[in-house]
Image: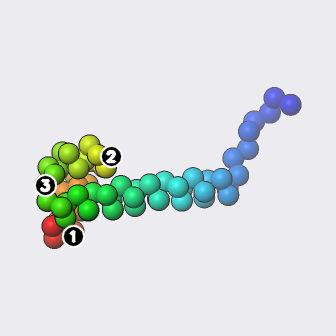
Amino acid sequence: MGGKVLELESDKLIEQGLELGRLENQMATAVKMLQVGKYTIEEIADISGLTVKKICALKDEKNL
């Protein structure tokens, strides 16, 4: 049955949830590193997987 593979709505929701969880984890890691205060923005971006722009926004948002 070489038909098209159906993508279920539940699978899409699960994937979105996983992606959101990954992003929240990355942001939490970056915030902790900013709080420690001994890492550069570039180091935090490299370790967390977030962009430098996002790290700067987090820093401003959290007043760190």
Tell whether 38 sits left or right of 27.
Answer: left
Pair 1/3: label in front:
3
Quick one: which residue is furthest to the top in this view?
Answer: 2
The secondary element bearing badge 3 is classed as: loop
Residue 31 at x, y percent in the picture: 26, 62
**Residue on which disc 1 sits:** 62
Q: Which mark is residue 23?
A: none
Q: Describe residue 13's horizontal placement relative to residue 20 as left or right.
A: right
| Type of the residue with mark 1 | Lys
The residue that disc 2 covers is 49
Seen in the image, is 48 located left or right of residue 8?
A: left
Dot 1 or dot 3: first in sequence order is 3
- Cβ–Cβ under 8 Å for marks 2 and 1: no
In terms of secondary structure, where does tag 1 sit? loop
The residue located at (80%, 33%) in the rendering is: 3
Q: Residues within 10 Å of mark 1 (few under 14, many from 20)?
A: few
